[in-house]
Amino acid sequence: MSNTLTTILLVDDDPDDQYIFNNALKVVDKSIFLSIAKDGVNALEKLRLFKPDLIFLDMNMPRMNGMEFLSRIRMLSTYHEIPIVVYSTYTSAEDKSKAASMGVKDCIEKPVFFEDTVNTLRKVICSYSPQGYA
């Protein structure tokens, strides 16, 4: 990973959550490129095109859910160093434990309010970007 965070892949099937995440990210840092995948299958397709600096992963999606995506991506050594943050409405303790054993850096419950989403993204992005955010 480079010294600055330039690309994020959001893997989430909910259009409203995609919209909120995208707008919150613009408040935090307009220079970060956001790519959105609607499920794990679509995310694997996007990973063939570019390598993000950080992945936010929903757990509950059609076709290929978050846990299945994690299993697949961890079989591909090219992507081992990409930090993955589970970003989901609900994640069971069992899924959190399993995700952690698969190298997930953090499990975050999706905030309800826009300002909380901004603050959550600022905190996570700051932890992966040396330049930080105020």
Image (cartoon, rainbow, N blue to C red):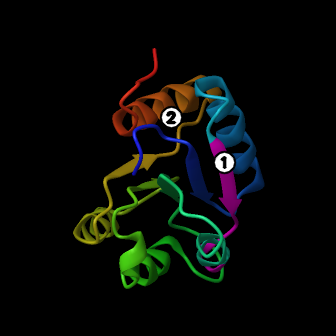
Q: Quadrant of the C terminus?
A: top left
Q: Is residue 65 above or below residue 105?
A: below
- Name the residue that disc number 2 marks: 121
> In the figure, residue 64 lies in which quadrant?
bottom right
Residue at the spot 63% in from the left edge and 34% down from the top edge: 25
Q: Considering the numbered disc 1 on the image, is that residue within a helix, a strand or a loop?
A: strand
Q: Residue furthest front?
A: 2
Q: Is residue 79 above or below residue 93?
A: below
Residue 48 rendering spot, x and y as whole percentages:
61, 76
Whole-angstrom CA distance, mark 2 to mark 1, is 13 Å
Residue at the spot 75% in from the left edge and 43% down from the top edge: 19
**Residue type, mark 1 in image:** Leu
- Name the residue that disc number 1 marks: 34
Residue 90 rendering spot, x and y as whole percentages:
47, 56
Nearer to us in this view, 93 or 5: 5
Q: Which residues are magenta?
A: 33-41
Residue 123 rendering spot, x and y as whole percentages:
41, 30
Residue at the spot 46% in from the left edge and 21% down from the top edge: 133
Residue at the spot 65% in from the left edge and 83% down from the top edge: 63
Please tell me whether residue 34 belongs to the stretch shown in magenta: yes
Q: Is residue 97 above or below residue 56?
A: below
Residue 97 in the figure: left or right of residue 15: left
Residue depth check, mark 2 versus mark 1: number of the one nearer the observer:
1
* Callout 2–callout 1 Cβ contact below 8 Å: no
* Mark 1 crowd level (few <14, some 14–19, many ≥20, 10 Å Cα): some
